[in-house]
Amino acid sequence: MDLQLSNRTALVTGSHRGTGAIIAQTLLAEGATVLVHGLEPGQAEAAVNELGGGVAMTGDITTEAGTEELIAAIADYPVDILVNNYGTAEPGSWLKSSSDDWITAYQKNVLSAQRLIRHFLPAMSARDWGRIINLGTVGSSRPNSRMPGYYAAKGALANLTVGLAKEVAGSGIRVNIVSPGLILTPEVEQAYLAKGRREGWGDTWQEVEPHVAKDIPIRRIARREEIASLVAYLCSPLADAIHGQNIRIDGGAVDIVT
């Protein structure tokens, strides 16, 4: 399927590693010009080398100054697609997390996206075309008791997405949020392999995964490539009727549609 992205320019935040790098790789394969982003010098350059394409961009989007640095670097590129992939979950609890911890979670998971949206929205409106995809989590509406600041911030990001979708109603801009459940990353695999050995489940991922995913209807957890494929489709003109949606990709683990 041709996603018709060969004449589009995409900024994928936090695309120097992890799921962001897979999203960048997928968009590159679809012919888009991809701005590969790192927060610190050298991160994006290394990712571009590994990906075999893309344009390296740097800026710490958790701060106003770092965001301005990134915006200045991007000035010559007409960004049609903004994928707010960057975000991070850090250990925390209701009793141990301070107000500063909560504010930091908001900076990283909400304002990092809001600042870029505020910058790119006028140009998208002038062109009457754009795609803004935010990366959330199923925990934004089904949070655990742990990491309350993170889940509250992701809940705010989901709320932001709906409000923005209403703001651009009647235009050619489409706004959505993709909310994964548990994703198979090297860190997740190693953690569960260690647990699998302790519990006697086995020594390989093939043996351990059915135990990890016993409550997931598809009996496995999502792959980063699946997240990237969904994001790429939402970036496409083919997904023009999808707007203001919180799309879960969790193997059916959340069985209540809201």
Image (cartoon, rainbow, N blue to C red):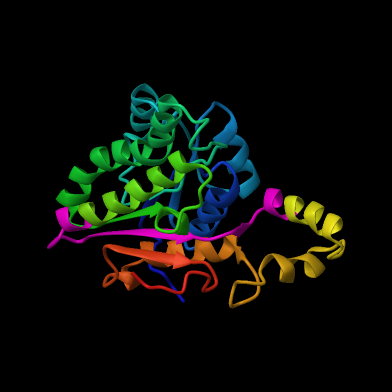
Judge whether residue 82 can be spotted in this image. no
- Identify the residue shown where x is 50% and y is 60%: 180
Residue 174 place in picture, x, y as percent: 26, 60
Work out whether residue 125 or residue 110 is closer to the camera in this orientation and state it: 110
Work out whether residue 243 or residue 206 is closer to the camera in this orientation and state it: 206
The range drawn in magenta is 165-189
Residue 15 place in picture, x, y as percent: 52, 44
Q: Is residue 10 above or below residue 114?
A: below
- Identify the residue shown where x is 24% and y is 39%: 118
In the rendered view, does 22 fall on the left or right side of 242? Answer: right
In the rendered view, does 61 fall on the left or right side of 22? Answer: left
**Residue 188 among those drawn in magenta:** yes
Q: Is residue 143 above or below residue 64?
A: below
In the rendered view, does 68 fall on the left or right side of 151? Answer: left
- Identify the residue shown where x is 51% and y is 40%: 88
Work out whether residue 162 or residue 46 is closer to the camera in this orientation and state it: 162
| Farthest residue, direction top | 65
- Identify the residue shown where x is 17% and y is 57%: 166
| Farthest residue, direction left | 170
Q: Quadrant of residue 217?
A: bottom right
Residue 68 place in picture, x, y as percent: 33, 26
